[in-house]
Image (cartoon, coloured by chain):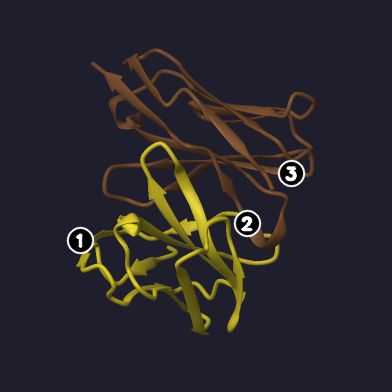
Chain colours: A brown, B yellow
Amino acid sequence: GENVEQHPSTLSVQEGDSAVIKCTYSDSASNYFPWYKQELGKGPQLIIDIRSNVGEKKDQRIAVTLNKTAKHFSLHITETQPEDSAVYFCAASTGTASKLTFGTGTRLQVTL
Amino acid sequence: DVKVTQSSRYLVKRTGEKVFLECVQDMDHENMFWYRQDPGLGLRLIYFSYDVKMKEKGDIPEGYSVSREKKERFSLILESASTNQTSMYLCASSLSPSGYEQYFGPGTRLTVT
């Protein structure tokens, strides 16, 4: 089955700096790669996703890049703000009934 | 807005008890999922259902069963709770067949003593 590795497990940045979280996947059939943000006391929420026919996608301060050859994808957050502090999860899917395999999560702390 | 609700935010049960965790979604989604979340392990899929009365095992189904009698409701059952099932349980739903986005409930923190 699919295996998704995520690094780093914790990340601390100063407000205004950029943050990068990286994930690798094992199944070359995976074609959908979402990122979820989980705030304290809440369930994860989708913030951005990318499909395998696209190399990069951007939405305001967040962007995701995908390298299919190397089987890795990354989340980039620019101009970080305190409200970006949360746990971020990457995931991968081959499309079977929307089944996702999640990474182990990255706790991002944005300090003032 | 999609809403996924879970019956309890916190639950404390004794070893050997039968435990029911309920999840309800209000968007007529085909797919529903149960995950457990543990520190350092991320979200691991226990079971999922792509239609009423249909279910498939996820990555860690041992010790759990599920029930989906109505489209909007998906129940997770711990037949005989054990301490290693102490965890955060998250329910999610998604629209099939092309709707990959999963909408999560707030979670149930289950403690088995």
Nearer the observer, B19 or B55: B19
**Which residue appears farthest toward the bottom when viewing the image?**
B69
Disc 3 target residue: A31
Kindly identify the residue that appears in the image at 65 percent across and 67 percent down: B96
Which amino acid is tagged 3? Asn
Residue B9: image location, x then y, percent: 24, 62
Q: Which residue is mark 2?
A: A99
Mark 1, residue position: B113
Point out the frontmost of discs 1 and 2: 1
Q: Is residue B99 in view?
A: no
Residue B12 quadrant: bottom left
Q: Amino acid at mark 2?
A: Lys
Quadrant showing the N terminus of chain B: bottom left
Name which residue lies at 42% across and 40% down. A37
Label 2: element kind:
loop
Q: Chain of mark 1?
A: B
